[in-house]
């Protein structure tokens, strides 16, 4: 059975998780931008960073699959939102569902990991988007704020790192 770990990461948090998972499992790791033929793999583990509600590279990667019948698929989101909050997980899953074929979504095992952010390292365009989002959610009354919004407000313009390699154990158990 041929296995591959594919990741989509702008600022390397997701890449760190993918590389650690690859090191522990001895499964090759590759960026979604470099994958040639996803169809040659039977077991696909995709780790994608969350940006603006979507997972980086997810749709581009999975639209290349021709037949999912004999495939094992694990999708792992990596973002600032706390995966222990069920509302966050529901929102992430709904966004994943919008990005990939429903058959792939239904077949996949989905996990969520917490990442990090360093505003000092963001590209200018990402800084602008985050500022616009921050200004928008700050106007929402406190009693109507989601946990995801509150986390964004709390971490805005800071460097935070929630990487926890022990959280990979749930994925390793499924592999």
Image (cartoon, rainbow, N blue to C red):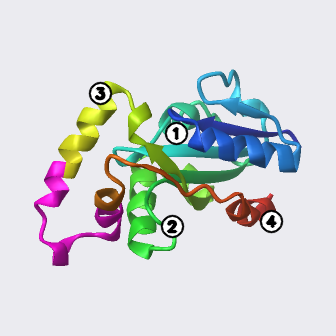
Helix, strand, or loop for circle 3? helix
Cα distance between the residues tagged 3 and 2: 26 Å
**Rendered view: 125 above or below 14:** above
Q: Which residue is mark 1?
A: 58
Helix, strand, or loop for circle 4? helix
* Residue that extends furthest to the bottom in the rendered view of this protein: 143
Q: Are marks 1 and 3 in contact (CB under 8 Å)?
A: no
Q: Are marks 3 and 2 in contact (CB under 8 Å)?
A: no
Helix, strand, or loop for circle 2? loop
Q: Is residue 170 visible?
A: yes
Q: How many residues crowd mark 2 within 10 Å: few (<14), some (14–19), many (20+)?
A: some
Q: Which residue is mark 3?
A: 125
Residue sitting at x 51%, y 73%: 84
Cα distance between the residues tagged 4 and 3: 38 Å
Q: Earlier in the sequence, mark 4 or mark 1?
A: 1
Q: Earlier in the sequence, mark 1 or mark 3?
A: 1
Quadrant of the image occupied by residue 171: bottom right
Q: Which residues are magenta?
A: 135-151
**Image quarter (top left, top right, bottom left or bottom right) of the N terminus:** top right
Q: Which mark is residue 11?
A: none
Cα distance between the residues tagged 4 and 1: 23 Å
**Image quarter (top left, top right, bottom left or bottom right) of the C terminus:** bottom right
Q: Are marks 1 and 2 in contact (CB under 8 Å)?
A: no
Q: Which residue is mark 4?
A: 173
Q: Nearer the viewer, mark 4 or mark 3?
A: 3
Q: Which residue is mark 2?
A: 83
């Amino acid at each position: 059975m041929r296995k591959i770990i594919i990741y989509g990461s702008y600022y390397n948090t997701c890449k760190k998780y993918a590389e650690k998972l690859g090191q522990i499992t001895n499964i090759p790791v590759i960026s979604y931008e470099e994958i040639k033929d996803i169809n040659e793999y039977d077991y696909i583990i995709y780790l994608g960073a969350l940006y603006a509600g979507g997972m980086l590279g997810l749709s581009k990667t999975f639209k290349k699959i021709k037949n999912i019948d004999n495939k094992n698929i694990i999708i792992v989101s990596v973002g600032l939102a706390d995966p222990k909050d069920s509302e966050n997980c529901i929102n992430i899953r709904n966004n994943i569902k919008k990005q990939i074929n429903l058959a792939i979504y239904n077949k996949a095992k989905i996990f969520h990991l917490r990442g990090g952010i360093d505003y000092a390292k963001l590209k200018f365009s990402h800084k602008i988007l985050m500022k616009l989002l921050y200004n928008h959610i700050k106007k929402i009354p406190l009693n109507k704020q989601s946990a995801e919004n509150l986390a964004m407000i709390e971490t805005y313009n800071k460097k935070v790192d929630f990487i926890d390699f022990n959280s990979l154990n749930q994925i390793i158990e499924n592999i």
